Image: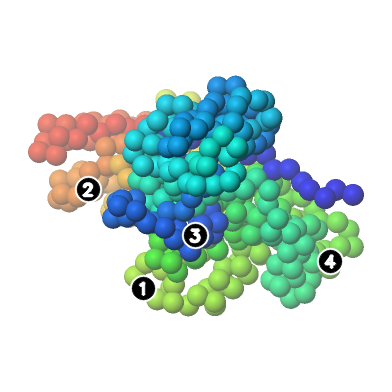
């Protein structure tokens, strides 16, 4: 039977990951009681403990197998030897680093019966506040282990049973503890976590839990998740079907709702301040464009004197707005503001002002110009227009009127982007 499973961890840009030092340290591995010794550097380096300078293993190299002269004139080699021999043991540090370590008192000779060539052995100091090159420790603890013993996969079943009143609606879900462990290996608490086969939405659950834990500990946890799941039908006769779920994504969305409610009930204090924990989500679907709509798109001429509102009705205003905001770099969760221009509703996000609906007239153009003139904080310089909703005459009027703001006190070079 399979005892272990493998998880592939990779970076799209390994150089960037190293340069930005995105990897975290496992603080739970740090035993503060182990740092029980002190020297003249305690105010800057903190307390320390000794660790052996030699090691055995598979990574043997002759260049790391050399003699070190001790205070009594003896010579010691790795593994307590008094001469050179390849027994698989080497020093952890190079000759140059050992010289530096002795000069800066990171190394110490200690009397021991381990060495056959001297009454001394050599050990290095592991300090609380600096690493073994003297640099201030920004992150404390050991590197995360590549062997994950806890949590076990069965805990994923327990979490589903707990949320869905004892019903196992999804087979073999990953436990949230595993996803949290993986996310904690990165020192980023505001990243976007994408799960491309999200299943029962364990990842969303884990992200919400981590954000709650961060807020509880006085940190800022602002991770976001994107769950992607095909509307795959649940198995016939399954517990999920008996409970009224038709597709897997429905189970995932319900889990997010139930997990959010559970987190909120267990952490009421996280929702009482002016910046409450955000446990909400938005649901988006990808839908193929009907053939008759594609035919309309191909036959539409931007020089026409009339608009075609039927094309907008195929997509819907929210879909067009969400698509464009993503296209313009605002993502799926950025807020927008509705701007009333004399009865016509436009949408403002950042420096973009979106015109989607039809029935935009010259009267609305004048209201727009009035807002630019009278509102000092109204400064969008990119107007995006759903071309199918506008006549050419109104578009020309719009372009001509906003052009003048280049020569005003605001000095706005407003572009009009007509999208079809």
Provide the residue designation for mark 2. Answer: 378
* Place of residue 264 in the rendered image (x, y in percent of width and height, measured from the top left): 52, 73
The 10 Å Cα crowd at callout 3, few under 14, some 14 to 19, many 20 or more, is few
Provide the residue designation for mark 4. Answer: 239
Choose the circle earlier in sequence order: 3 or 2. Answer: 3
Choose the circle earlier in sequence order: 4 or 1. Answer: 4
SS at mark 2?
loop
SS at mark 4?
helix
Looking at the rendering, which quadrant does residue 310 occupy? top right
Checking the image for residue 34, the label placed there is 3
* Place of residue 46 in the rendered image (x, y in percent of width and height, measured from the top left): 35, 55
The number of callouts visible is: 4
Callout 3–callout 1 Cβ contact below 8 Å: no
- Kindly report which numbered mark, 4 or 2, lies closer to the viewer in this rendering: 4
Callout 4–callout 2 Cβ contact below 8 Å: no
Give the CA separation, mark 4 to mark 2: 54 Å
Q: Which residue is located at x 65 percent, y 25 percent?
A: 85
Instruction: Describe residue 18's horizontal placement relative to residue 251 as left or right.
Output: left
The 10 Å Cα crowd at callout 1, few under 14, some 14 to 19, many 20 or more, is few
Choose the circle earlier in sequence order: 3 or 1. Answer: 3
Give the CA separation, mark 3 to mark 1: 39 Å
Choose the circle earlier in sequence order: 3 or 4. Answer: 3
Instruction: Describe residue 134's horizontal placement relative to residue 3 as left or right.
Output: left
Q: Which residue is located at x 19 percent, y 35 percent?
A: 412
Give the CA separation, mark 1 to mark 2: 30 Å
The 10 Å Cα crowd at callout 4, few under 14, some 14 to 19, many 20 or more, is some
Q: Which residue is located at x 38 percent, y 47 percent?
A: 130
The 10 Å Cα crowd at callout 2, few under 14, some 14 to 19, many 20 or more, is few
Looking at the rendering, which quadrant does residue 273 occupy? bottom left
Provide the residue designation for mark 1. Answer: 273
Q: What's the image's color scheme?
A: rainbow
């Amino acid at each position: 039977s399979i005892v272990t499973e493998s998880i592939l961890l990779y970076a799209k840009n390994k150089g960037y990951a190293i340069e930005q030092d995105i990897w975290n340290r496992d603080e739970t591995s740090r035993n503060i009681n182990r740092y029980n010794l002190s020297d003249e550097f305690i105010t800057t380096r903190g307390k320390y403990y000794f660790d052996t300078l030699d090691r055995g293993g598979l990574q043997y190299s002759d260049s790391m197998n050399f003699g070190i002269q001790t205070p009594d004139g003896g010579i010691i080699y790795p593994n307590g030897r008094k001469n050179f021999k390849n027994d698989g043991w080497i020093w952890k540090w190079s000759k140059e680093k050992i010289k530096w370590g002795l000069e800066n008192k990171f190394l110490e000779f200690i009397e021991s019966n381990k060495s056959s060539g001297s009454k001394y052995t050599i050990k290095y100091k592991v300090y609380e506040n600096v690493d073994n090159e003297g640099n201030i420790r920004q992150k404390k603890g050991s590197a995360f282990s590549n062997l994950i013993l806890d949590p076990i996969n069965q805990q994923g079943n327990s979490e589903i049973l707990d949320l869905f009143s004892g019903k196992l609606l999804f087979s073999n879900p990953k436990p949230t503890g595993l996803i949290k462990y993986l996310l904690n290996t990165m020192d980023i608490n505001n990243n976007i976590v994408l799960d491309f086969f999200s299943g029962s939405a364990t990842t969303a659950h884990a992200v919400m839990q981590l954000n709650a834990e961060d807020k509880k500990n006085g940190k800022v946890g602002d991770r976001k998740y994107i769950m992607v799941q095909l509307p795959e039908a649940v198995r016939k006769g399954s517990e999920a079907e008996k409970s009224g779920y038709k597709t897997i994504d429905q189970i995932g969305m319900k889990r997010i709702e139930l997990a959010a409610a559970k987190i909120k009930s267990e952490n009421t204090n996280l929702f009482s301040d002016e910046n409450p924990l955000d446990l909400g989500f938005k649901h988006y679907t990808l839908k193929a464009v009907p053939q008759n709509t594609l035919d309309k798109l191909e036959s539409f001429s931007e020089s026409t004197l009339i608009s075609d509102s039927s094309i907008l009705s195929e997509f819907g205003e929210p879909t067009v707005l969400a698509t464009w905001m993503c296209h313009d770099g605002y993502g799926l969760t950025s807020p927008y503001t509705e701007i009333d221009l004399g009865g016509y509703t436009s949408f403002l996000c950042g420096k973009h002002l979106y015109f989607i609906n039809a029935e935009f007239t010259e009267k609305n153009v004048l209201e727009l110009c009035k807002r630019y003139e009278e509102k000092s904080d109204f400064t969008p310089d990119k107007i995006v227009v759903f071309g199918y909703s506008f006549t050419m005459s109104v578009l020309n009027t719009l372009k001509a009127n906003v052009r003048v703001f280049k020569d005003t006190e605001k000095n706005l070079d407003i572009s009009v982007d007509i999208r079809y």
